[in-house]
């Protein structure tokens, strides 16, 4: 696949499920970004992605190369704040897929009536994601010392971010 091939971001469909599960599980397996430790299978993956307010995918040709999930961060009086997670195929990193996913997520968050997008736990050492978020106007709220347990068992700081929609 040509790295210059056009990236299209769209709503996920049922046909995307096997690729969504594969990409999600790879990030979980890496153990350096998502808090989840359990892998998805076809059944749990279907339930997980269907439970989101919105699941977006980035495609290059007929291959899903990235995804994001968007959902409320809280309920009631804080229900206007959404949260999202992003995953890009490891062999497609560096192709600006993450940026396209975040920009689409900001648009969808506004479209769905949310007013703020908040990231609760960006691992401090995830410098590529942090630089992207800051370049796109996200504001870091501080640092939570040792808030994320890495796969190897050591703890790293997390940095919450937000962006007004």
Image: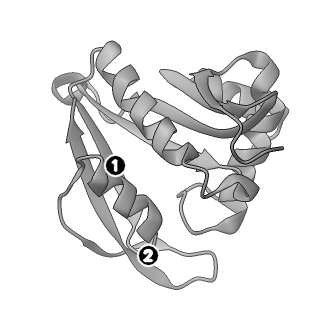
Describe residue 92's horizontal placement relative to residue 95 as left or right. right
Picture quadrant of residue 163: top left
Describe residue 84's horizontal placement relative to residue 50 as left or right. left
Dot 2 surroundings within 10 Å: few (below 14), some, or many (20 or more)?
some
Q: Nearer the viewer, residue 6 or 109?
A: 6
* Among the two numbered marks 2 and 1 on one chain, the one whose residue lies closer to the N terminus: 1
Mark drawn on residue 119: 1
**Quarter of the image containing the C terminus?**
top left
Vertical arrangement, residue 73 with respect to residue 96, above or below: above
As measured in the structure, the alpha-carbon distance from the residue carrying label 2 to the one carrying label 1 is 15 Å
Mark drawn on residue 41: none
Disc 2 target residue: 125
Secondary structure of the residue carrying tag 1 is strand
Return the x and y of residue 50 as percentages of the image width and height. Answer: 62, 21
User: Residue at 44% of width from left, 59% of height from top?
Assistant: 129
Secondary structure of the residue carrying tag 2 is loop
User: Residue at 69% of width from left, 31% of height from top?
Assistant: 59
User: Residue at 30% of width from left, 33% of height from top?
Assistant: 74
Vertical arrangement, residue 104 with respect to residue 134, above or below: above
Dot 1 surroundings within 10 Å: few (below 14), some, or many (20 or more)?
many
Picture quadrant of residue 47: top right
Return the x and y of residue 90 as percentages of the image width and height. Answer: 71, 58
Q: Nearer the viewer, residue 155 or 129?
A: 129
């Amino acid at each position: 696949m040509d790295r210059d091939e056009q990236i299209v971001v769209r709503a996920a469909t049922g046909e995307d499920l096997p690729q969504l599960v594969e990409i999600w599980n790879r990030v979980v397996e890496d153990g350096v970004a998502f808090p989840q430790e359990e892998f998805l299978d076809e059944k749990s993956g279907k339930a997980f992605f269907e439970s989101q307010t919105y699941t977006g995918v980035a495609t290059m040709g007929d291959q899903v190369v990235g995804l994001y999930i968007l959902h409320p961060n809280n309920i009631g009086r804080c229900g206007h704040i959404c949260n999202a997670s992003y995953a890009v195929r490891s062999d497609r990193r560096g192709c600006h897929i993450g940026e396209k996913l975040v920009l689409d997520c900001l648009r969808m968050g506004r479209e769905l009536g949310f007013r703020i997008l908040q990231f609760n736990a960006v691992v401090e050492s995830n410098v590529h994601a942090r630089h992207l978020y800051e370049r796109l106007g996200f504001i870091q709220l501080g640092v939570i010392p040792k808030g994320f347990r890495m796969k190897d068992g050591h703890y790293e700081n997390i940095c919450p971010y937000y962006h007004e929609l």
